[in-house]
Amino acid sequence: MARFTFKLPDIGEGISEAEIVAWHVAVGDRIEEDQQIADMMTDKATVEMESPVSGIVVERAGEVGDQVSIGAALVVIETDVDAAAQEAPTTPETAAPAKTAEQYGAENPGVIGSSAPLPLAGGAEDAPAPNREAPAVLHDSPPPPPSPPASGSGADKALASPAVRARALDLGIDLAAVKTDGDRVRHADLDAYLRYGNGEGYHAPHASRARADLPIKVIGMRRRIADNMQAAKRNIPHFTYVDEIDVTALEAMRADLNDHRGGRPKLTMLPLMIVAICKAIPEFPMINARYDDEAGIVTRHGAVHLGMATQTEAGLMVPVIRNAQDRNVWQLATEITRLAEAARTGKATSAELSGSTLTITSLGPLGGIATTPVINRPEVAIIGPNKIVERPMFHGDEIVRAKLMNLSISCDHRVVDGWDAASFVQLLKKYLETPVLLFAD
């Protein structure tokens, strides 16, 4: 038998190690050439590792969440297994775990009643034949109904209104145990009972439904998000500015554009917002920048590579719209759709998830009143549009219906002054409240 050591290949420039985020094989498994064996994560990109040979897995590098250095052994595979060996009975080391009677019974409804484990390691021909003669176990008769409370019990003796009785029943309280100053138990007496108890403790309703604690190891994307957010809050002195924007005219224009879009993607608020950001950046270049605090250098970027925070099942990812300043609203809508889909399906490349110079983050319909987003380090600002709400507002002496949206911006106070951040948002407000300016040269 020959052993082949599959070493973790170089999966990116400047990458020294990768994290195991999923194993697709176990020790003892037989794998074929090009079969997927593990998922490795680096720089927010997941790379699928495939086996270059066929054979039996005899060693693995570690568990999910462990780091493996580039060039280190990932798996060891025993190759050159002849046909006779492949067809040999499974050894105890590689045998599938025995199934319990409950598991076997769930898969074979005709077999009921055995309590001993039934080993099924040898394949279908080795499994015991189902006992067709054993009848299913049924209740001879339905369980008897619960006995009614004895007459004259404490609960019957306690006087209370139907509403109080219903509340006590819902809370699981015995009215006989509730002290009262009068001849009847009132809601105030129940309140006092809940506050002070009767020395025997009080069990909240549905307490039996509480789930057990579930420890979850922080790995993969979740750990990288945690590390990045911790570094951002530890190193960046944040400040957040929030302003209210009337987007009534903008929403009307968006509806008109969608009515005449033809085969183009439907416009959301985001492409229009990005156009406004790109038009405002030249007057406020300090917003579109990255700060290398170790070298003490702030780079103000000419192009706007806009990070778009996207929620996925693995956590928050930030695909990047390259050269957003050169795209119109329809091109932006198309790119937003493509990148969001790539991020959610795990197909976004490392290049598509890095290199942003400014980030926009939105919770969409869940946007709330205002947000204080955390900066995507080493950027110096992040913009957060919030939920659009319809409210009455004054236009001169008239009260009109208006669609209003709060816009938040968090900035690195080492690089961006409060005046600059507020002035930048005011210019965004001008473009968004007068949307024809978005298409003016």
Image: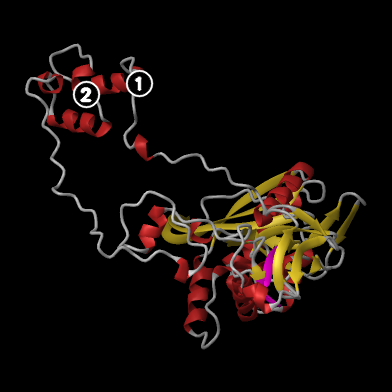
Q: Which tag, 2 or 1, sits closer to the chain's start?
A: 2
Q: In which quarter of the image is residue 170?
A: top left
Instruction: Provide the major secondary structure of the magenta segment.
Output: strand
Element type where label 1 sits in the image: loop
For disc 1, the neighbor class at 10 Å (few under 14, some 14 to 19, many from 20) is few
Where's residue 36, x and y in %?
Answer: 67, 71
Element type where label 2 sits in the image: loop
Q: Between residues 331 and 18, which one lies in front from this camera angle?
A: 18
Judge whether 85 appears above or below 398 on screen.
below
Q: Total of numbered circles in the picture?
A: 2
Q: Which mark is residue 201?
A: 1
The amino acid on which the numbered mark 1 sits, given as a three-letter code, is: Gly
Pointer 2 residue: 174
Q: Between residues 234 and 296, which one lies in front from this camera angle?
A: 234
Where's residue 150, x and y in %?
Answer: 9, 24
Q: Between residues 367 and 403, which one lies in front from this camera angle?
A: 367
Q: Give the range drawn in magenta.
A: 31-40
